[in-house]
Image (tube, rainbow, N blue to C red):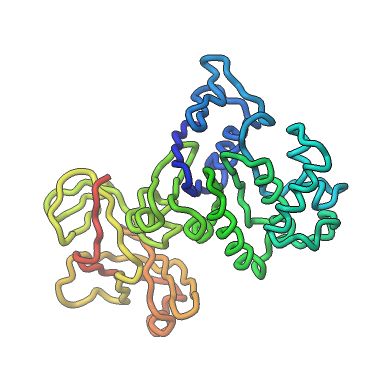
Amino acid sequence: MDVALWVEPGEVVAVLGPNGAGKTTLLRALAGLLPLSGGRVLLDGVVLEDPARAIRMPPERRPIGVVFQDYLLFPHLDAVENVAFGLRCRGVSPPVARAHALDWLERMGMADHGRARPAELSGGQAQRVALARALAVNPRLLLLDEPLSALDASSRTEVRRDLRRHLQSFNGIRVLVTHDPLEAAFLSDRLVVIERGRVVQTGSAAEVTQKPRSRYVADLVGVNLFRGHAAGDRVELGDGSSLTIGDRLEGEVFAVIHPRAVAVYRSRPDGTPRNVFPGKADAVDVHADRARVHVSGPLPLVAEVTPGAAEALRLAEGGAVWISVKATEVSVYPV
């Protein structure tokens, strides 16, 4: 794994990536739960870990709070004792730790559930208790591992709003790991996308979605992404196919085509569209008022049409089709 991550004070950063990308490994390394073999971890200029200098601060001494994916509340302790646990581990006396825990539960709207054990709590309530436990120790860095993944769909929206409010009220550094782009965009100021243990893109949600730099990000956004070499008004894609574009560029570029910009026909279209390719309709996925058509061929891509158009063209039956894209509908930017 080779990830460089820098987070400014007061910033919320979401680490986004597919399963196996290294998101949880990164979080565990920051928390000190996974020893580093190289690199280093600095927090406010203090070295928490640097194998080259034989420095390694143990997890319990790091000013870091962690909310785990499944919350990991102690089943035999009630909510108050769960929140007080971290404080007591840091030498705070039981009465003072309990008082702080009650205060944090009240901040989370959980004052009436202090005597409840984890099995008696809903998913959203358990998440609030886990967040209170992480914040009660006054961490400088707050880490959240898939904070909403254990919730059902009916409670996720409400808890997401609550979590955003609590994150905004915390003035430390916040890093959350997720595979959900909606969650990442809603909760964070900046996205860091990692794949195969490396950062492939970083920026605001708008910057990442407008100019995806990997197939994974393009699939998240729902657009077609190609990489090729621009020479004037053409982009050579390397497999013998090419795209005509509206601008004139030189060098390695990404080319993005929104599915809505792709027209689908059963026979070669008349006129002079700049990008016309034969293909085969492999699958049609209908979502509400749109149908996404997966087309294989010299330029494999996804087109988006109305369900009525998909039915009129009998696209669900598969078979040969033609696709066309206007040159001005191809968005191109440097690699």
**Which residue occupies the extreme top position in the image?**
53
208 over 313 or under it: above or below: above
Name the residue: 86% across, 56% down: 115
Residue 54 visible in this rendered orientation of the protein: yes
**Closest to the observer: 288 or 119?**
119
Residue 171, x across and y down, in percent: 53, 47
232 over 173 or under it: above or below: below
Name the residue: 47% across, 58% down: 185
**Closest to the observer: 65 or 170?**
170
**Which residue occupies the extreme right position in the image?**
76
Residue 6, x across and y down, in percent: 44, 37
Name the residue: 15% across, 50% down: 249
| Residue 38 falls left or right of residue 66 | left
Residue 244, x across and y down, in percent: 18, 59
Quarter that holds the C terminus: top left
**Closest to the observer: 110 or 121?**
110
Q: Quadrant of residue 319?
A: bottom left
Residue 42, x across and y down, in percent: 50, 29
| Residue 75 falls left or right of residue 329 | right
**Closest to the observer: 204 or 8?**
8
| Residue 75 falls left or right of residue 130 | right
Residue 16 visible in this rendered orientation of the protein: no
Q: Quadrant of residue 105?
A: bottom right
111 over 261 or under it: above or below: above
Name the residue: 21% across, 64% down: 275
56 over 189 or under it: above or below: above
Could you tell me how many numbered marks the image carries? Answer: 0
